[in-house]
Amino acid sequence: MEQPHLAGPSPINPITCVDMHTAGEPTRIIWNNIPPLAGTLLEQRAQAKSRFDEFRRLLMLEPRGHYDMYGAILRPETELVVSGQADMGVLFMHNEGFSTMCGHGTIALGRFLVDVDEKIFPRRKHLSYDPDSRTTALNLHVPCGIVRVTVPTLSSGKSDAERPVSFVSVPSFATATSLTVSVPEKYRWAELGGRSSVTVDIAYGGAYYCMVSAEELGFPGGLGEVALQDMDRASKLLKETVVANPELQYLTRDSRTAEEGFLYGVMITDSRLGHVSAVEGSAASRAQLDAGSEETGLCFFANQQIDRSPTGSCVAARVALAYAAGSLAKGEKRVYNSLVTRAHRGLAGFVGSVFDDAGSGGVRVCVEGYAYYTGYHTFVVEKEDGLGVDGFSVRDIAL
Ligand SMILES: O=C(O)[C@H]1NCC[C@@H]1O
């Protein structure tokens, strides 16, 4: 299909963005010069995908982004914003397309939306500040529903970077526990050895994830001893195995359409990586000290993008799994680290807990984390630039 040429961004009509990171994972927040998207949030996402994919490629891929970049396009007019149920809509994008949910991006957006003015966030003035908790709450319309975001706020009205942002997930649930997945010959990876099956859990936290332990994936030494490219290869083949099996489709679909119900990521866990000591004096780690337990994992999502953060929507899925298994009581907190937050003492993991019952066996999960501003961008495309309004990935071109 022919892509319509985007108007700009030219040097006099640039795209402006704020970049943030949440537990090391980037979010590029975009609010101007967005191609015309209309209708419901999901219709807007469909248009962004089918007619304006260059916009995503321009801002996510090289030379302005990179393979593991993540973005959030603000959508101030969606059906739920117009009806007053939500304050702002957002589309999330990555190296492959658009997602249904993003926890780390939600945490970053919480701070950003409290800090910006009404030109960028028309409903800013409708937000309510709670003086007791010194927080501001807002409802964010994300493709999988509405998430309630609570943002620590200073008396100046700006967000407080010293305290964690939290959000309450959409109903999250386990769809399969200890499921034996047989791996057809063509998908088997070397580390499986002679095995022809793996045991996994599948759960939903706004997106569907497949959880597998490092040992089960064929890495007995655990996550700490595996090269990233080996994990990449094995998790890719496991994902392909699950996606290719029509009998497993219902586990990542439920009653959702193919656009909403699909396997988004594989989370490799390692239960043997125990507690990591807190950074002395760091606000982030102090906030985690009252959590009773801790887990570490690494998530490969979309086109094998590596999440530096503990993956907020997958934390929701894992809390739902733990609750269903009886290993996490309502209100009990657990720290979720990624390999990156575990390794870097300046990064804090996320804290997950069951917020309430969502009916039909599901729970809403509270996920807490810290996001920080990293910079401001003004992106342009020169008319002489042969790359035009596009981006590329060095990993995807034959060199
Ligand atoms: O935190 C999250 O939920 C997101 N991080 C990247 C992949 C997920 O969308």
Image (cartoon, helix red, strand yellow):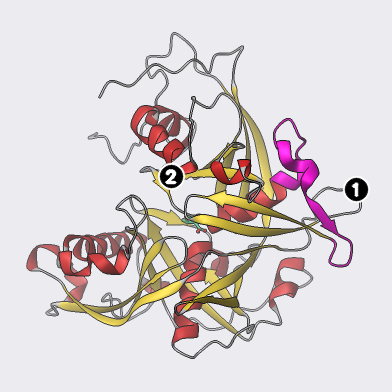
Magenta span: 113-134
Q: Amino acid at mark 1?
A: Ser
- Residue 290: percent from left, percent from top: 71, 82
Mark 2 Cβ and ligand 1 under 8 Å apart:
yes
**153 shown above or below 373:** below
Q: Which numbered dot is residue 156?
A: 1
Q: In what element is the residue under mark 1?
A: loop
In this rendering, position of residue 298 left or right of residue 122: left
- Residue 151: percent from left, percent from top: 74, 57
Q: Is residue 199 visible?
A: yes
Residue sitting at x 24%, y 34%: 399
Picture quadrant of residue 192? bottom left
Q: In what element is the residue under mark 2?
A: loop
Q: Is residue 24 visible?
A: no
Q: Is residue 105 magenta?
A: no
**Mark 2 — residue?**
94
Contact (Cβ within 8 Å) of mark 1 with mark 2: no
Viewer-proximal residue, 347 or 138? 138
